[in-house]
Amino acid sequence: MNRTLAVIRMHSLNRFGWFFLPWIIMFSSFVINLGIAVLGQPEGGVTTGGLASAYIYFFVMGIVIPADTFSFSLGLGVRRKDYFWGTNAMFGLVAVGSAILLTLFSIVENATSGWGVDLHFFHLPFLSDGTVLNWLWVHFVGIVFCYASGLVIASIYRRLGRNSLYVFFFAMIVIGSLGSYLMTTYGLWRDLFDFFSGYTASGFAGWLMLVSLVYVGVSYGLFRRATVQ
């Protein structure tokens, strides 16, 4: 436990990367879209996907953080499993805090009719359906899923090396292309869309959380046997 806490404290020293940079990126996108809404005043308002910039950053974090700190931590005598759980605990805290802030901004945006200019940046259709707790859950799971997706890529690289990562991406492209071909050939796209249309955002987030847990489990197994590079 002490070593896990030491890993958390180590990560907390990088306050800019963990706490400030994702919000700088996201608010830069917000200011640009707010300016578009104020100056353009399009009919029906502005609905933007700028919020995705924060999620993309958390995906990148899942890849970059191990690259920056894994070897360094092991050089200080930290065990692999302590590093893994300490890093995930740190991100869990960041994910909770980020989800709360995103939910608060969504509440304010909804209460002010899109900041007075009908801008939909935080409070988006489908994602903001249901209660405030649903919004909080959706944001939290979205952040965790993006991070876990990046983490599993980092773990493959750490355990199996660069060439194996290339093989992994190539296999994903082949599987995706083959799957798309079969879906098109047998006319299954409509069935797939009908299946997912039956879920609310919070229900869909439940499935994403299960996938995230699988990613974390795979990453743990790979990190336990990862070499220092």
Image: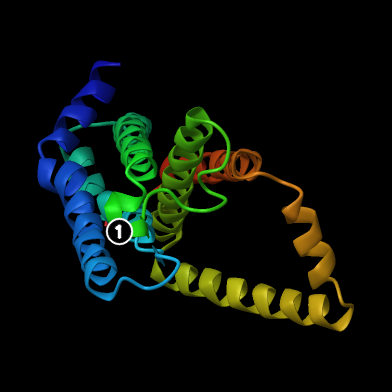
Number of residue marks: 1
- Residue closer to the observer: 114 or 143: 114
Position of residue 103 measured from the top left corner of the image (x, y, whole percent): 38, 37
Q: Is residue 196 above or below residue 165?
A: above
Residue extending farthest right: 186
Amino acid at circle 1: Val
Q: Quadrant of the N terminus?
A: top left
Left or right, 64 with reference to 148: left
Instruction: Give the residue number, with chain letter if any, for mark 1.
Output: 117
Q: Quadrant of residue 118?
A: bottom left
- Residue closer to the observer: 64 or 218: 64
Q: Quadrant of residue 110?
A: top left
Position of residue 159 measured from the top left corner of the image (x, y, whole percent): 43, 54
Q: Quadrant of residue 53?
A: bottom left
Position of residue 195 measured from the top left corner of the image (x, y, whole percent): 79, 55
**SS for dot 1:** helix
Asked whether the viewer can see residue 60, the reply is no
Left or right, 187 with reference to 154: right
- The structure's colour scheme is rainbow
The residue at the point 23 percent across, 66 percent down is 38
Q: Is residue 29 above or below residue 24?
A: below
The residue at the point 48 percent across, 68 percent down is 164
Q: Quadrant of the C terminus?
A: bottom left
